[in-house]
């Protein structure tokens, strides 16, 4: 590699060209100086000997202890694990770091809202609050929509927190059934 080519690469990496002369050349070439001045070793086994900025050389050369020693702490890559080892989740490295959120036990399409009217026979009006973040103002705005729900035994009262689930159309405006009363009015 000619000196002008090295200088051109160094200018791209924002390294001073005068650092090319002398002892700094092997480190800038992406290798580590060995006993023989003409031999170069790559900083990392997977990296070829290329032009690497000194800023990135520190990143590639690790001073951490190796896990390949005889300390018994070697990690098997996923490509070398058998199907039985992969099916047992506890053998996958780092699996304990994965967070699994708890599953909701609510039916599909279920909504939770407050009963705002119970004046009709076997029907209640339920106000469901949904929150939406408005990007322009970066605020969370509440949007309320009312749904008519079928209350077969007329057990819901005003102010109750209920869960409604979608069902087959009962009338022109009624598409939900009250599944359960989550919290009666006045109870915390």
Image (tube, rainbow, N blue to C red):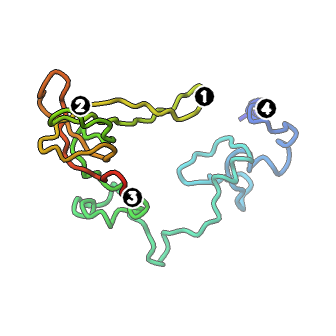
Give the vertical position of 31 relative to 16 (above or below).
below
Q: Quadrant of the N terminus?
A: top right
The circle drawn on residue 188 is: 3
Q: Nearer the viewer, mark 1 or mark 2?
A: 2
Instruction: Rate crowding at label 2 as few (under 14), some (14 to 19) or many (20 or more) other CA atoms within 10 Å.
Output: many
N-terminal-most mark, 3 or 1: 1
Q: Nearer the viewer, residue 163 or 31?
A: 163
The residue under the point 70% across, 44% down is 29
Q: CA distance from mark 1 to mark 2?
A: 32 Å
Instruction: Rate crowding at label 4 as few (under 14), some (14 to 19) or many (20 or more) other CA atoms within 10 Å.
Output: few
N-terminal-most mark, 3 or 4: 4
Q: Nearer the viewer, mark 1 or mark 4?
A: 1
N-terminal-most mark, 1 or 4: 4
N-terminal-most mark, 1 or 2: 1
The residue where tag 4 is placed is 11
Q: CA distance from mark 3 to mark 2?
A: 25 Å
Numbered disc 3: secondary structure: loop
Q: CA distance from mark 3 to mark 1?
A: 33 Å
Numbered disc 2: secondary structure: strand
Q: CA distance from mark 1 to mark 4?
A: 44 Å
The x and y percentages for residue 12 are: 74, 31
Numbered disc 1: secondary structure: loop
The residue where tag 2 is placed is 148
The residue where tag 1 is placed is 137
Q: Image check: 39 left or right of 21? A: left
Q: Residue furthest right?
A: 18
Instruction: Rate crowding at label 1 as few (under 14), some (14 to 19) or many (20 or more) other CA atoms within 10 Å.
Output: few
């Amino acid at each position: 590699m000619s000196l002008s080519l090295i200088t051109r690469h160094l200018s791209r990496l924002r390294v001073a060209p005068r650092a090319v002369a002398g002892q700094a050349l092997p480190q800038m070439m992406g290798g580590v100086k060995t006993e023989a001045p003409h031999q170069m070793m790559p900083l990392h086994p997977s990296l070829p000997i290329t032009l690497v900025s000194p800023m990135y050389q520190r990143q590639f050369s690790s001073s951490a202890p190796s896990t390949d020693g005889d300390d018994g702490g070697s990690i098997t890559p996923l490509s070398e694990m058998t199907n039985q080892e992969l099916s047992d989740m506890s053998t996958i490295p780092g699996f304990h770091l994965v967070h699994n959120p708890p599953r909701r036990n609510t039916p599909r399409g279920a909504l939770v809202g407050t009963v705002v009217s119970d004046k009709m026979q076997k029907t209640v009006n339920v106000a469901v609050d949904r929150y939406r973040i408005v990007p322009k103002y970066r605020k969370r705005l509440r949007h309320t929509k009312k749904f008519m729900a079928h209350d077969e035994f007329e057990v819901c009262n005003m102010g109750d927190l209920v869960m409604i689930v979608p069902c087959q159309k009962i009338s022109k405006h009624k598409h939900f059934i009250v599944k359960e009363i989550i919290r009666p009015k006045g109870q915390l």
